[in-house]
Image: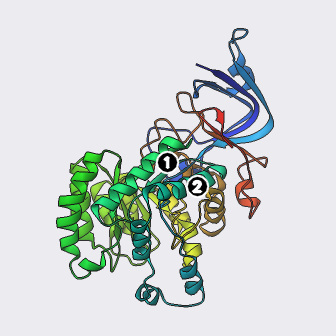
Amino acid sequence: MTRKLFRNAHIFTPIDKGKPLAGEEQGKIAEIKDGAILANGGVIEKIGVDCGVTKGLKPNCVDEEYDLCGACLIPGFVDPHTHMCFAGRREDEFGKRISGLPYLEILRQGGGILSSVKAVKDISEDELFCRTRHMAMRALAKGTTTMEIKSGYGLETDLELKMLRVIRRVAQETPLNIVATFMGAHAVPAAYKERADEFVDEIIIKEMLPKVREQGIAEFCDVFCEEGVFSTDQSRRLLKTAAAMGFGIKIHADEVNDLGGAGVAAELHAASAEHLLAASEENLKAMGRAGSIAVLLPATAYSLKKLYANGRNIVDWRVPVAIATDCNPGSCFCESIPFVFGLSVMNMNMTVNEALTASTLNAAYAINRAKKLGSLEIGKQADFLILDGETPVALAYHAGSSSILGVYKAAARVI
């Protein structure tokens, strides 16, 4: 295996304590000046101050050595919530929305999630792969080295399986680590408009879930728990069944209305609940006690011109917080964690250290990858970024710029 030594770096990383970091712990970041990383086969063998890492190394035991010239180095970003597998943009719909057209009218005109469903149905699997790979590589260029991608623009068994095959292929043919989530409960199809219970029980639970499990690609099951989509009772039934079948569970919760989705996440000990703009303090605190991660999506609030989730309070309530792009063609066409990082600091009042943990270690916990990813520690994969700046503050300070000079995946430069 190839041994690589990276020297003369200013390293910033959260420290993994075996569970997501919450409260004051979320803001604690280890700083190593004159730092070095020794990677063996893409895995960190040693990390610390240069003299400690290099002490005792035998001559010629390192295959490649790099001087990073004092650059700021952080873990690779982990994006734990995307809908990046889609077929067509909804730019025209966005223009109508910012011009004041109500979303219900956009739906009446054929827009919204169901328009993305039609686009996936009409496109070939190869073309869907090419478009998804393109988006994933754009995210990689902005520092995302690991991401989750959801299905959910199928709403029919064959189309959901098609999307999951595409997601697997993107994982195989790009440098990224990718986690697949099944989200057949993303919207209620028009044919089941007044029969959501039947769609959940007969189509998703009895038909889709067994075939998705048999396919073996998706690790998680997600559901959109919101007024006009799926109720808390429907969401609970689906997630309990999915958990019993071996899936990790997630929930889109309380984005527009406080329906109680965050409470369902706590009750079922879901890996995460996402959005949470309208979630109650009581249910958020219950999530914290249950260890469920609050995945906040500030770029979606930006795109929809909504109030942001109260990241400051959620952290202070000792709920572990992660941040994500929610990259999708409708409500948030954004693949940039640096942009999300800046919004988290400026508009959700999180500290830079909290946002760094939220975009790395806690995000890795949200998709069950923290054992190998999310922080720079011995035994973890050497996924790291070189920043254009002295500290991670640059990610919020240099507005409108990526601030990413180099992206390393398993100690190999990929950008």
Residue 10 visible in the snapshot: yes
Judging by the rendered image, the residue that carries numbered circle 1 is 170
Residue 222 visible in the snapshot: no
- Residue 356 in the image, given as x and y percentages of width and height: 61, 51
Judging by the rendered image, the residue that carries numbered circle 2 is 134
| Front residue of 410 and 114 | 114
Give the residue type at disc 2.
His
Residue at (21%, 50%) from the top-left corner?
244
**Where is 229 relative to 247, above or below?**
below
Q: Quadrant of the C terminus?
A: top right
- Residue 388 in the image, given as x and y percentages of width and height: 78, 49
Q: Is residue 209 left or right of residue 131?
A: left
> In the structure shown, which secondary structural element does the residue marked by tag 2 occupy?
helix
Q: Which comes before the other along the chain, label 2 or label 1?
A: 2
- Residue 327 in the image, given as x and y percentages of width and height: 53, 63
| Front residue of 133 and 307 | 133
Do the numbered discs 2 and 1 sit on residues whose CB atoms are within 8 Å? no
**Where is 146 relative to 201, above or below?**
above
Q: CA distance from mark 2 to mark 1?
A: 9 Å
Q: Is residue 13 left or right of residue 311?
A: right
Residue at (63%, 51%) from the top-left corner?
353
Q: Is residue 4 left or right of residue 390?
A: left
